[in-house]
Image (cartoon, rainbow, N blue to C red):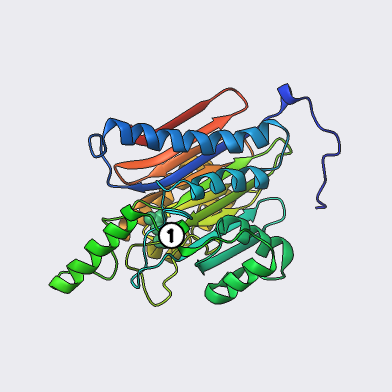
Amino acid sequence: MADTEDTEMPDAANLQWSLAIHGGAGSMKPGRFSAEEDAAFIAGLAAALDAGAAVLAGGGTAMDAVVAAVAVLEDDPQFNAGRGSVFAFEGHNEMDAAVMDGATRAAGAVAGTTCIRNPVRAARAVMEQTPHVMLSHEGANRFGVESDVEQADPEWFATPHRRAQWEEFRAKGERGDGAWFDTDLKYGTVGAVALDSHGHVAAATSTGGLTGKRWGRVGDTPVIGAGTYADDRGCAVSATGTGEVFIRIAAAHEINARMRMLGETAQQAADAVMSEVGALGGEGGVIFAAPDGSAGFAFNTPGMFRGRSNSEGLRETAIYAG
Ligand code: ASP
């Protein structure tokens, strides 16, 4: 079927759109953070939600909306993506990001970047300016320079809070009780999914990965079908959590496959896939946005930084389950 382009801009009041965002899922329970910290997280989520919603309410595309929302979260040092990313083993920040367009199933991703201010914009540039889907490490950095996405110094990404977490991780290793990487010391990954008023969905995800990751470890975030996927025949998905498990079950694509082949709703498919993630020992969550206007969450952790809004006037943010 040929792609059709809406040529007329519909009346703003009649636009139908929806948006969901996340700032990572984890073990946070009420009381884990101070009231001020909770309020700051909520304010960060609200700023990202509003950035994406403004695009959609103006008749913009789902792709523009998810990139706008994720770039706000990348610039916010509270979240593990862009500025405020966790530290890799050697003591610097390595970031991964992906985008996917549900109308065309075009996708772009970067892995292991160290000097691109907003990895999500580099992922979009990979999609739009190259015949490739994923670029990694030094090559991705060089592409960032050549494609004119904004650069940033290592100090931009490295916050004192994340450095302290890394030092704690390294000290544990020296005491002999270290792990492959630290899953307790991070909250992580940001993402957005949207349905636009033209009926198309898109997804974007961005992360600093795991504290102490090494050997060029890459998680699910930039792997199309694992942490990020979008298809107008199913839905847009962005994941966060134990990346290795999300890769092994191709989580974001699996949600889409269940919708197409089993006729499940996005919520049913997301719940089923999160049970499977749990059965393989994984933790985390997903957000989804489908062409029927539904946008929501499924997670198996005590909390997930999240928010959603739509053209019906919904605008909500939350951290804890329930
Ligand atoms: N999924 C991310 C990764 O594996 C981390 C996270 O979401 O916490 O890199």
Query: Visible in this render: residue 50?
Result: yes
Total marks placed: 1
Give the percent coordinates (x, y) of residue 270: 46, 46
Judge whether 223 appears above or below 266 on screen: below
Judge whether 132 appears above or below 292 on screen: below
Residue drawn at x 53%, y 39% is 48
* Side of 210 relative to 290 (left or right): left
- Most extreme residue toward the right is 7
Query: Visible in this render: residue 321?
Result: no
Q: Quadrant of ligand 1?
A: bottom left
Q: Which residue is mark 1?
A: 208
Give the percent coordinates (x, y) of residue 4: 82, 46
Q: Quadrant of residue 303?
A: top left
Give the percent coordinates (x, y) of residue 298: 42, 43
Along the line of sight, which residue is nearer the eye, 210 or 17? 210
Tag 1's secondary structure? Answer: loop
Along the line of sight, which residue is nearer the eye, 115 or 30? 115
Q: Kindly identify the amino acid type of the residue bearing the numbered disc 1.
A: Gly
- Label 1 CB less than 8 angstroms from ligand 1: yes
Q: Quadrant of the C terminus?
A: top left
- Neighbourhood count class around disc 1 (C-alpha, 10 Å): few under 14, some 14–19, many 20 upward: many
Q: Quadrant of residue 41?
A: top left
Residue drawn at x 47%, y 28% is 316
* Side of 93 relative to 280 (left or right): right
Give the percent coordinates (x, y) of residue 72: 53, 44
Residue drawn at x 46%, y 52% is 239
